[in-house]
Amino acid sequence: MMLCIAGTESLDMLTGLRALNLDPGELDLRRYVGVIFRTEAYLSPLAQRTIELLQERIR
């Protein structure tokens, strides 16, 4: 099973897909995310910012 989240306007471009009507709160998309990195290792600016955002989110 594959879940694709898109607007109904994209259904015209794809075959074999159908819209699934869900009531608000019926679909829970929360996910647990973790980050592991080596101490003193290079982290790209994007990785650094991602870690900052995740840390801010848990505070």
Image: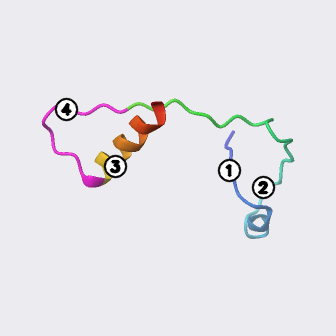
Q: Which residue is mark 1?
A: 4
Q: Position of residue 35 (x, y in %)?
A: 35, 33
Q: Which residue is mark 2?
A: 17
Q: Main secondary structure of the magenta part?
A: loop
16 displayed left or right of 21? left
Q: Earlier in the sequence, mark 4 or mark 3?
A: 4
What is the distance, in whole Å, between disc 3 and disc 1 at their CAs? 27 Å
**Residue 38 — which label?**
4
Q: Position of residue 32 (x, y in %)?
A: 52, 29
Q: Position of residue 30 (x, y in %)?
A: 61, 34
3 displayed left or right of 9? left
- Single out the mark in the foreground, 4 or 2: 4
Q: Earlier in the sequence, mark 3 or mark 2?
A: 2
Name the residue rendered at 42%, 38% in the picture. Answer: 56
Q: Is residue 42 magenta?
A: yes
User: Marks 3 and 1: CB-CB under 8 Å?
Assistant: no
**How many numbered marks are there?**
4
Residue count near mark 1 (Cα–Cα under 10 Å), binned few <14, some 14–19, many ≥20: few
Q: Nearer the viewer, residue 57 or 28?
A: 57
